[in-house]
Amino acid sequence: MTIAITDVVLRDAHQSLFATRLRLDDMLPIAAALDDVG
């Protein structure tokens, strides 16, 4: 059995009440690291 997990935090951040304070300036520094892990 294979379980796949897709993180949609950056995609859905502004649609989520929890993440409404996530600004672009907060997302950009971690974008490369997220890309590296797939």
Image (cartoon, rainbow, N blue to C red):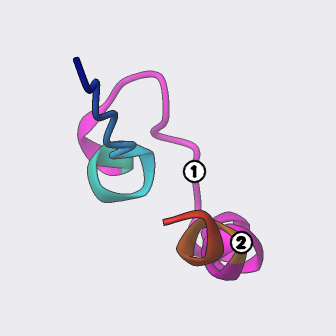
Q: Position of residue 14 (x, y in %)?
A: 33, 48
Quadrant hosting residue 11? bottom left
What secondary structure is found at the residue carrying circle 1? loop
Against 27, residue 11 (above or below) is above
Q: Position of residue 16 (x, y in %)?
A: 31, 31
Whether 15 is among the magenta residues is: yes
Mark earlier in primary sequence (1, 2):
1
Residue receiving disc 2: 33
Quadrant hosting residue 2? top left
Whole-angstrom CA distance, mark 1 to mark 2, is 17 Å
Quadrant hosting residue 33? bottom right
Q: Residue furthest right?
A: 29
Residue occupying image coordinates x 65% and y 79%: 28
**Mark number displayed over residue 6:** none
Q: Nearer the viewer, residue 37 or 19?
A: 37
Against 22, residue 18 (above or below) is above
Residue occupying image coordinates x 31% and y 42%: 6
Residue receiving disc 1: 22
**Which of pointers 1 and 2 indicates the residue nearer the eye?**
2
Q: Nearer the viewer, residue 5 or 23?
A: 5
Query: Hey, what amino acid is under mark 2?
Result: Ala
Highlighted range, magenta: 14-32
Residue occupying image coordinates x 72% and y 69%: 30
Q: Does 9 sit left or right of 23 as displayed?
A: left
